[in-house]
Image (cartoon, grey):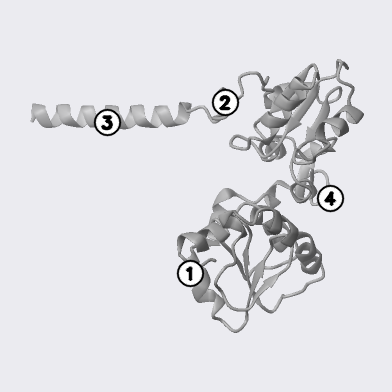
Amino acid sequence: MKVSTLGKMVFLSVVFLSIAATCLADPFVLRPKFPKVKPLTQGDLAAKYDQAIIVDVRSKMEYDVIHITKAKHIPMGKADFLALLEKTRAKTESAPLALYCNGYTCAKSYEAAEAAQDAGFINVFCYDAGVMEWAKSYPEKTVLLGKSPASKDKLISEEKLARAKLSFADFKVKAQNTSAIVIDTRDPLQRAKESGLDQSKNVDLPNVRNIPMDRLVTLLEKGEFKDNQLLIFDAVGKQVQWLQYYLEENGYKNYAFLAKGVLSAVEAGAAK
């Protein structure tokens, strides 16, 4: 009996320590990779909000879906990123320069801050909790689908996004339905530039329509495909997160995404 009780106590201790470790885990997993970059907490950004120059370094679609109200949009991927940044705030200006992207596991804001520092900008910070965490705490200083304050009940959870994603096998089965429309949202020019990458391959499914993301958003806003099941894929399964906002906002319910995008088809041996 003593051994059994001791065993239970050890087991409970292990469970408790495991839970505690999980709770205390640092979500800012990228900070060690960018030691030169100064992180800015959410509270600090809120305190500096009025005087700070805030820059969103994500794609246009991400910015159009949701952004911090006063944020300037300068995508990190633009060749003239640093020149555009300097037009927004001089290198030696003292106002805090806060760069942000999608949060804990998004490296763009770190890379942008590091590049700015290397180019001679001073007082540069990375707000690395990201726009979604900001929206939850400061909806009155957030624009969601062109409206502010942002409606917190329209923020799409990770769980809801995950429920909309299918394996390639399930995606392929649904594609056989005569009412289904399979849409490839990749940009043809980008695919051509990255022709050697797996995510630029053709997916082996019949009757795939190529409708780049911007065009698809316009069609959704017009109510196209309302009578069809929409099966949508992108390159690696990340951009559909933002498309989901337009689907929900415009009343689409019968839709699904290919998990990991084209990479799922590659893993299934169904891409060439």
Q: Are the residues tagged 4 and 2 within 8 Å (C-beta)?
A: no
**Which residue carries the number 2 mark?**
33
x and y, in percent, of residue 137 in the image: 70, 35
Q: Amino acid at mark 1?
A: Asp
Q: Quadrant of residue 81?
A: top right
Q: Amino acid at mark 3?
A: Leu
Q: Are the residues tagged 1 and 3 within 8 Å (C-beta)?
A: no
Q: Is residue 90 above or below residue 145?
A: above
Image side of residue 188 versus residue 84, left or right: left
Q: Which residue is farthest right?
A: 87
x and y, in percent, of residue 237 in the image: 59, 55
In the depicted view, which residue is nearer to us: 179 or 37? Answer: 37
In the depicted view, which residue is nearer to us: 124 or 188? Answer: 188
Mark 1 or mark 4: which comes first in sequence? 4
Q: Which residue is farthest left?
A: 1
Nearer the observer: mark 2 or 3; the answer is 2
Q: Secondary structure at mark 4?
A: loop
Residue at 64% over, 51% down: 156
Q: Are the residues tagged 3 and 4 within 8 Å (C-beta)?
A: no
Mark 2 or mark 1: which comes first in sequence? 2
Q: Is residue 250 above or below residue 155?
A: below
Residues at marks 1 and 3, CA–CA distance in whole angstroms: 40 Å
Nearer the observer: mark 3 or 4; the answer is 4
Mark 3 or mark 4: which comes first in sequence? 3
Callout 1: 10 Å neighbours few (<14), some, many (20+)? Answer: few
Residues at marks 2 and 1, CA–CA distance in whole angstroms: 37 Å
Callout 4: 10 Å neighbours few (<14), some, many (20+)? Answer: some
**Which residue carries the number 3 mark?**
12
Q: Amino acid at mark 4?
A: Gly
**Which residue carries the number 4 mark?**
146
**Which residue carries the number 1 mark?**
170
Residues at marks 2 and 3, CA–CA distance in whole angstroms: 35 Å
